Amino acid sequence: MSTYLLCFILFCVGLYCILRKRNIVKIIIGLGIIEYSVNMFLVLIGYRMQGRAPILAKDQAINNMVDPLTQAMVLTTIVIGLALMVLVVSIAIRIYEKYGTFDITKIRRLRG
Amino acid sequence: MEIHLILLFMIFAGIVAVEVKDLISSLIALSAAGLALSLGFLVLKAPSLAITQLVVEILCVIILIRATINKDLPMVKDGRWFFNTVATVLFIGCFLVFSYFALKELPAFGQPLMRVSGEYLAGGFTQTGVANLVSAITLNFRSYDALAEAAIIFASIIGVLAITRRIGKTNEQ
Amino acid sequence: MNSNSKGMTLIVKTVTRLTVGLILIYGIYIVFQGHIGPGGGFAGGVIIALSFIHLMLAFGKEAVLKKIDQEKYFLFASLGALALLMTLSFGFMRRHQPVSSSGDFGLFSGGLIPLSDIASAVMMASGLFVIFLALTLRTKREKK
């Protein structure tokens, strides 16, 4: 149970970074931290004590494997996180070219 | 107990990445957290995820540094606004309350619910002929996941191309 | 790193010439054994894209864009996505009946799943390289 609590603390660190910082690059870093904590949480749910990796071998009967369904879902989540990161970075570069700053409060002031 | 050490290291690296003023140091701390996550996947018996996370982390750091290193960045200044502080406390408190309710419903660590995946484990190899069960689930049992994932990657490519191409045209004129 | 001398210094170029082939072979290995071991199409595709990025960062953009330009990389990404769609929808029709259901843990076991791996690897490699080209070439144009 304590591992779940540590994952929640990591999520709170990312949430604090997103809500409190004013630099866009810092906000992207906060998104990355939240993604890490969610991935780790999903894999922790599927872990079985003294389990084995879900890969079969030739002359070997394994009967205590960890949950492969959550691992497949996290495999999807990692790649979607990469797509999200790339899109946010390109939008950040566009904002920098338009306004000349990474500070979100100054962007709001320029817009009026 | 290795997983506790890895999680504590990730929290420490995350706090460093949030609080350091220099942006390049912050990106390096973020990549340290990502590599620790890859190590944690390896401890939790998920080697496919460990490889994917390691590689994706390296690509993310290259793109982030490449995108931000050319600008002469000003130092990050902390905002001290009243509304922002209230919103931060409110969101974190809301999250902690809901996580307290969710924590009572979760299965204990080490005893997962194998209601759906027990079937995959039992008949996965005879039905697909694939030894790596994560590949079997991603590409055969739940193929819509892989299809939607490809659609999202493609939408992201088109989005990046659209954003950058418009800048190019306005710059040339 | 000025714009006239293409790429980085001589040391970086020599080391790149030695290592980029190994990285490419490792990526192809990860793709092809994704159904009998850890790995898969997405991780292997990202490794192949990283080898291209390595080459481009060391030698400048002419080393990569001389034969194939950006539109052709995007065409490869589209073809990979179409191949992934075709293999997966063919898998919907013949569900639970792999084409060669030998199940002997060999390289050619598993029916359609290795083909889906290869298609997704092509899509990921060329798509991510297109994204990297779009971001970096735009940055250089802004510096001019």
Image (cartoon, coloured by chain):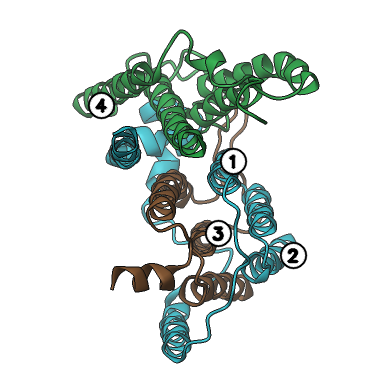
Residue C112 shows in this picture: no
Outermost residue to the front: B173
Position of the N terminus of chain B, as image quadrant, is: bottom right
Quadrant of the rendering where the C terminus of chain B is positioned: top left
Determine which residue is flagged by label 2: B5
Question: Residue C24: horizontal and vertical position, in percent?
Answer: 60, 18
What tint does the image give chain B?
cyan
Q: CA distance from mark 3 to mark 4?
A: 30 Å
Gap in angstroms between the C-alphas marked 4 and 1? 30 Å
**Which amino acid type corresponds to the residue marked 2 in the rendered image?**
Leu
| Residue occupying the far top of the picture | C67
Q: Which chain is brown?
A: A
Find the distance from the CA under tag 1 to the CA under tag 3: 23 Å
Identify residue for label 4. C85
Mark 1 to mark 2 CA distance (whole Å): 27 Å
Q: What residue is pinned by disc 3?
A: A40
* For the residues bearing labels 2 and 3, Cβ distance under 8 angstroms: no
Decide: marks 4, 1 in contact (CB < 8 A)? no
Residue to which mark 1 is pinned: B62
Instruction: Return the chain for callout 4.
Output: C
Q: Helix, strand or loop at disc 1?
A: helix
Residue type at mark 3: give it: Met
For image coordinates 25% across by 26% down, the residue present is: C85
**From the viewer's perspective, is C64 left or right of C10?**
left
Q: Quadrant of residue A13?
A: bottom right
Q: Which chain is green?
A: C
